[in-house]
Image (cartoon, grey):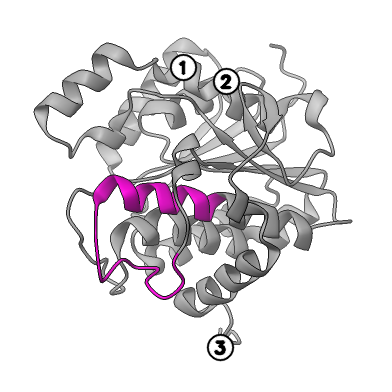
């Protein structure tokens, strides 16, 4: 790729490993400045060094943040806005798969907090910056796993029953619902919002699973570079300029599950997310 995109800014969460790192590397090749977000500073630095070696002259920046903490997400957004005057591409990628139910520092079930509310809060905090940079793009990493899920609004945080993979699937459905509702809200702004399934990828998502699961992912799943391809396509390709509110698989728009098209469910999820993140409260700052 050439360097004609110099001056544009892309922020990627979960960028220290897996498809996040591979998307960062590919996007950096086009001359776009890539701001890499992850919770582990050393892993972020190692990923940055790997990108600099693979892409000489790449412009990267590191903003460490734990996206299970709403305070840290707010600090991340404030730090980004203090350093940069535009945001052309936001890629929400950071995710977890937690075997046993746990709560974040905010008292919210961890998978729902990181995989959905992390996307929701960071996007909304940066939305004015993104809109002022239009044409701009928001890309959310979902998964085909969402197809086996449905959201129970009476038990969104899985207090009554918990299965790690089942809850992960629900969070990926929440990503699709969020993307579609976001796209509707952004109509006419020049900002697009799409989500995608990266494929069955061996990533750090499985690091907390048992040894057999971890070995199986390494043996039978595709590598992260392959999983990054559709995300890079949605973030940078002129072919999808203006395309919004879609779910992509292998660089093609695809059908998502039935509940994902329920606009009332999407609005309800948005309202609940507003309340859980405090976005619905007037700012005191």
Real-space Cα separation, disc 1 to disc 2, in angstroms: 7 Å
Q: Which is more foreground, mark 2 or mark 3?
A: 2
Residue 207 in the figure: left or right of residue 86:
left
Q: Residue at x 59, y 55 (%)?
A: 259
The residue most toward the right is: 188
Label 2 vs 3, first from the N-terminus: 2
Q: Nearer the viewer, mark 3 or mark 1?
A: 1
- Can you tell which mark lies on residue 284? 3
Horizontal and vertical percent position of residue 21: 43, 27
Screen quadrant of the C terminus: bottom right
Q: Identify the mark at residue 10; answer none if there is no mark.
A: none
Q: Which segment did they paint magenta? A: 152-175
Measuring 73% from the left and 47% from the top, which residue is drawn there? 245
Give me the residue at 59% from left, 29% from top.
231
Q: Residue sitting at 51 percent across and 21 percent down?
A: 25
- Image height check: is 24 above or below 140? above
Relative vertical location of residue 183 with respect to residue 194 in this rendering, above or below: below
Q: Is residue 32 left or right of residue 12?
A: right
Relative side of 128 to 146, left or right: right
Give the farthest residue toward the left. Answer: 211
Asked whether residue 160 is in view, the answer is: yes
Q: With respect to residue 64, does 271 lie above or below?
A: below
Q: Which label sits on residue 229?
A: 2
Q: Is residue 165 magenta?
A: yes
Q: Which mark is residue 225?
A: 1
Please tell me whether mark 1 sits on a helix, a strand or a loop.
Answer: helix
| Camera-side residue of 171 and 137 | 171
Q: Nearer the viewer, residue 182 or 282?
A: 182
């Amino acid at each position: 790729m050439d360097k004609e995109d110099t001056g544009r800014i892309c922020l990627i969460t979960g960028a220290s490993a897996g498809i996040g790192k591979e998307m960062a590397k590919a996007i950096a090749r086009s001359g776009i400045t890539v701001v890499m977000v992850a919770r582990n500073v050393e892993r972020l630095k190692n990923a940055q060094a790997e990108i600099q070696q693979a892409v000489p002259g790449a412009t990267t920046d590191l903003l460490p943040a734990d996206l299970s903490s709403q305070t840290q997400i707010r600090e991340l957004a404030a730090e980004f806005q203090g350093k940069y005057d535009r945001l052309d591409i936001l890629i929400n990628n950071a995710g977890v798969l937690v075997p046993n139910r746990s709560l974040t520092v905010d008292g919210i079930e961890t998978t729902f907090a990181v995989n959905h509310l992390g996307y929701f809060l960071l996007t909304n905090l940066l939305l004015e910056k993104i809109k002022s940079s239009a044409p701009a793009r928001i890309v959310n990493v979902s998964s085909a796993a969402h197809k086996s899920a449905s959201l129970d609004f009476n038990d969104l945080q899985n207090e009554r029953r918990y299965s790690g993979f089942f809850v992960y699937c629900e969070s990926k459905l929440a990503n699709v619902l969020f993307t579609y509702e976001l796209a509707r809200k952004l109509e006419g702004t020049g900002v697009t919002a799409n989500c995608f399934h990266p494929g069955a990828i061996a990533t750090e998502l499985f690091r907390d699973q048992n040894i057999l699961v971890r070995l199986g992912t390494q043996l039978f799943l595709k590598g992260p570079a392959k999983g990054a391809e559709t995300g890079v396509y949605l973030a940078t390709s002129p072919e999808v300029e203006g395309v919004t509110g879609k779910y992509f698989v292998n660089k093609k728009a695809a059908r998502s599950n039935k509940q994902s098209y329920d606009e009332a469910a999407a609005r309800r999820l948005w309202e609940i997310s507003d309340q859980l993140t405090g976005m619905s409260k007037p700012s005191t700052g």
